Image (cartoon, helix red, strand yellow):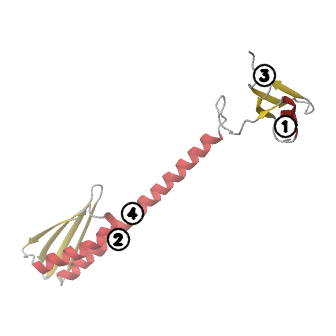
């Protein structure tokens, strides 16, 4: 946070500089250390005028108040700036939330579109060495499965046994050679 204090027709004392610095620290909770404060103090008629401007890399906030007491004017400026900053933060949060909801809806719509010719699911399981008859018995014990991959103990090659559409008979896939 950088603070610049300008006095027009009014000298900025150390007490005023410290007070502005202390009050400006309230704004750190919104921006961290990444903002600049420019305070201009002056007198107009019988009133003390404090004009404060806060600049961030993306935004700019400004408040001007007049009061008989300069400290009260500075307090009022800080309150006004805090209100402006809170309002802006709330607005940005709502925009981000709306964008997030839109992104989720777009992703859901994309997922609902039909996918063709793509591998959309992968299953991993252990391949056991079995005889074709043992593999048939194993597949009969798993009514939810349509096929079973196994290593044929007679040939040492990977085979697949599967249920035929009649749900009574089985087919066997064996590699050649």
Q: Position of residue 21 (x, y in %)?
A: 20, 73
Label 1 residue SS: helix
The picture places residue 77, in percent across and down from the top left corner, at 25, 74
User: On the image, numbered disc 2 is attached to which residue?
Assistant: 83
Q: Is residue 120 above or below residue 176?
A: below
In-image side of 113 versus 100 (left or right): right
| Residue 84 % position (x, y) | 34, 67
Q: Identify the residue shown where x is 66% and y is 30%.
A: 116
Viewer-nearest of discs 4 and 3:
3
Question: Mark 3, residues whose alpha carbon is within 10 Å: few (<14), some, or many (≥20)?
Answer: few
**Which of the two labelled residues, at mark 1 and mark 3, occupies the earlier sequence position?**
1
Q: Which is nearer the N-term, disc 2 or disc 3?
A: 2
- Establish if 35 lies above or below 129: below
**Mark closer to the chain start, 2 or 1:** 2
- The residue lying toward the viewer, choosing from 172 and 100, is 172
Measured in 3D between alpha carbons, the distance from the residue under mark 2 to the one under mark 3, in whole angstroms, is: 76 Å
Circle 3 sits on which residue? 174
Marks 1, 4: nearer the viewer: 1
First in sequence: mark 1 or mark 4? 4
Q: Are marks 1 and 4 in contact (CB under 8 Å)?
A: no
Tally the marks: 4
State which mark lies toward you, 2 or 4.
4
Q: Write down the residue under mark 4.
A: 89
**Residue farthest to the top, as pictured:** 177
Q: Secondary structure at mark 3?
A: loop
Instruction: Measure how far apart labels 4 and 3 are at the Cα level.
Output: 66 Å
How far is disc 2 from disc 1 in space, using C-alphas?
70 Å
Picture quadrant where residue 49 is located: bottom left
Between marks 2 and 1 in the image, the one whose residue lies nearer the viewer: 1
Residue holding disc 1 = 139
The reply to whether discs 2 and 3 touch (Cβ–Cβ < 8 Å) is no
Q: Nearer the viewer, residue 124 or 10?
A: 124
């Amino acid at each position: 946070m950088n603070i610049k204090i300008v006095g027009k027709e009014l000298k900025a004392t150390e007490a005023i500089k410290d007070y502005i610095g202390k009050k400006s620290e309230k704004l750190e909770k919104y921006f961290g250390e990444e903002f600049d404060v420019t305070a201009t103090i002056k007198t107009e008629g019988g009133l003390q005028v404090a004009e404060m401007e806060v600049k961030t890399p993306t935004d700019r906030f400004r408040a001007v108040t007049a009061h008989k007491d300069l400290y009260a004017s500075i307090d009022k400026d800080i309150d006004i700036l805090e209100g402006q900053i809170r309002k802006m933060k709330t607005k940005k949060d709502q925009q981000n939330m709306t964008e997030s909801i839109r992104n989720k809806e777009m992703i859901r719509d994309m997922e609902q579109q039909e996918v063709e010719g793509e591998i959309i699911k992968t299953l991993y399981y252990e391949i056991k060495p079995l005889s074709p008859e043992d593999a048939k018995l194993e597949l009969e014990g798993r009514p939810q499965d349509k096929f079973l991959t196994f290593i044929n103990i007679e040939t040492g090659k990977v085979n697949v046994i599967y249920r035929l559409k009649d749900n009574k008979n089985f087919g066997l896939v064996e590699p050649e050679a």
